[in-house]
């Protein structure tokens, strides 16, 4: 207790010396503001000089980025604290003085809210690059965690702002409830897209770079997964934007899923009845083996599927390295099969109909 009284007396003595040295309140305020500006410069020098050199010696990049991020808000905060102390020396009324202090604290709140937004983004990006430690945060879930962190920061800042200005929240909450119900009905489709987007990012039925096929036959490479929509590039190099709510209620086939990029293609061909089926099987296998774009493992195979109406139906089954090659390799194999069948005198069947006339119609005599 005695130590506290001693420190209080020392502070009052120094304050009295400051007042005696600079009797003008305006000059006192300017001196305090200038003094804190010097302190801000010294702090900035220490941060940018000493701490930055120390951070560069570590093997982590996050500390260097945090130091760079902390540079501007720390300097501005020291200056604003100086203005807050300087305002005490001016002959403001109590109400104006309180308003000035709250305004300066509000500016301080905005500065550190912006810093928190950037810090959250930096932290999430750093965590997404360490998939071995943070498996739930990766490139596809980065927007979700980034936006979630910013929402939490914004909510906490709004709470501090309300407490700072002593705003009554009863009317605000009532109005927010009515507005929320109205917006819920007006933006139900957007909310459905948003909620489905969260589930898509969390469940990961497909990722950026995957080839997907929709139930209506639309096929393309995924180039962006957002909270509202997913964008794919079709084989015609056309970008299609699909609302996430649509993807959540339709069947999506991921051609690059399952941990293996190889896909099987089927070349269907029908030969005429009476053809040598062993020869047909041998020729089809030779065609597949001669194509450099097909995989050697698993080996190509031929299946005799059925006795058709006008043909013996075969299928050449072979694997391709990735789904994007499906169209090109199918074209190449079809051409090769047609040429080899022609060279081997294997007839490709086509529908035929025999018409029998039971009797000729009578022609009336003229």
Image (spheres, rainbow, N blue to C red):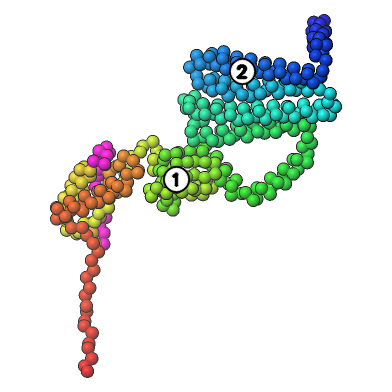
User: Looking at the picture, how far across and down is residue 166, in whole percent?
Assistant: 79, 32
Residue placed most toward the observer, 297 or 179: 179
Q: Residues within 10 Å of mark 1 (few under 14, many from 20)?
A: many
User: Looking at the picture, how far across and down is residue 158, in whole percent?
Assistant: 70, 33
Residue 4 placement, left or right of 340: right
Residue at the image point whose x is 16% and y is 50% from the top: 279
Q: Main secondary structure of the magenta part?
A: loop
Q: In the rendered view of the protein, which quadrant contains the C terminus?
A: bottom left
Q: Could you say which quadrant of the image residue 2 lies in?
A: top right
* Residue topped by disc 2: 44
Q: Which residue lies furthest to the right in this view?
A: 93
Q: Residues within 10 Å of mark 2 (few under 14, many from 20)?
A: many
Q: In this view, does 171 lie above or below 41?
A: below
Q: Is residue 294 magenta?
A: yes
Q: Does residue 12 show up?
A: no
SS of the residue under disc 2: helix
Q: The magenta stretch spans which residues?
A: 292-309
Q: In this view, does 82 lie above or below 317?
A: above
User: Looking at the picture, how far across and down is residue 205, in whole percent?
Assistant: 46, 40
SS of the residue under disc 1: strand
Q: Is residue 311 above or below residue 96?
A: below
Q: In the rendered view of the protein, which quadrant contains the N terminus?
A: top right
The residues tagged by marks 1 and 2 sit, at their Cα atoms, a distance apart of: 47 Å
Residue at the image point whose x is 21% and y is 93% from the top: 365
Q: Earlier in the sequence, mark 1 or mark 2?
A: 2
Please identify, in this view, whether the residue under mark 1 or under mark 2 is nearer the observer: 2
* Residue topped by disc 1: 232
Q: Is residue 79 magenta?
A: no
User: Looking at the picture, how far across and down is residue 229, in whole percent?
Assistant: 52, 45
């Amino acid at each position: 207790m005695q130590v506290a009284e001693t420190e209080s007396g020392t502070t009052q003595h120094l304050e009295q010396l400051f007042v005696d040295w600079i009797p003008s309140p305006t000059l006192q305020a300017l001196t305090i503001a200038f003094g804190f500006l010097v302190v801000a410069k010294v702090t900035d020098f220490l941060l940018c000089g000493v701490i930055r050199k120390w951070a560069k010696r570590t093997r982590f990049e996050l500390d260097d980025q945090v130091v760079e991020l902390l540079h501007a808000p720390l300097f501005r905060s020291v200056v604003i604290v100086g203005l807050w102390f300087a305002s005490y020396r001016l002959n403001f009324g109590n109400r104006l003085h309180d308003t000035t202090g709250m305004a300066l604290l509000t500016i301080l709140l905005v500065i550190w809210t912006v810093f928190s937004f950037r810090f959250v983004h930096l932290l999430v990006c750093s965590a997404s690059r360490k998939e071995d430690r943070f498996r739930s945060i990766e490139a596809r879930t980065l927007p979700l965690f980034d936006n979630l962190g910013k929402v939490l920061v914004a909510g906490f800042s709004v709470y501090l702002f309300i407490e700072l200005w002593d705003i009554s929240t009863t009317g605000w909450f009532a109005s927010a409830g009515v507005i929320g119900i109205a917006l819920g009905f007006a933006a139900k489709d957007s909310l459905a897209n948003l909620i489905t987007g969260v589930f898509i990012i969390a469940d990961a039925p497909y990722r950026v770079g995957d080839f997907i096929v929709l139930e209506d036959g639309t096929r393309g490479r995924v180039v962006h997964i957002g909270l509202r929509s997913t964008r794919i590039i079709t084989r015609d190099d056309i970008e299609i934007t699909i609302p996430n709510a649509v993807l959540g209620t339709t069947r999506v086939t991921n051609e690059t899923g399952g941990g293996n990029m190889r896909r099987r293609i089927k070349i269907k061909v029908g030969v005429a009845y009476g053809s040598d089926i062993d020869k047909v099987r041998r020729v089809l296998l030779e065609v597949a083996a001669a194509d450099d774009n097909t995989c050697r493992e698993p080996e190509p195979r031929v299946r005799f599927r059925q006795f058709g109406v006008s043909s013996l139906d075969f299928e050449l089954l072979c694997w391709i390295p990735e789904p994007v090659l499906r169209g090109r390799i199918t074209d190449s194999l079809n051409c090769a099969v047609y040429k080899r069948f022609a060279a081997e005198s294997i007839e490709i069947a086509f529908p035929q109909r025999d018409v029998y006339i039971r009797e000729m119609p009578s022609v009336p005599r003229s």
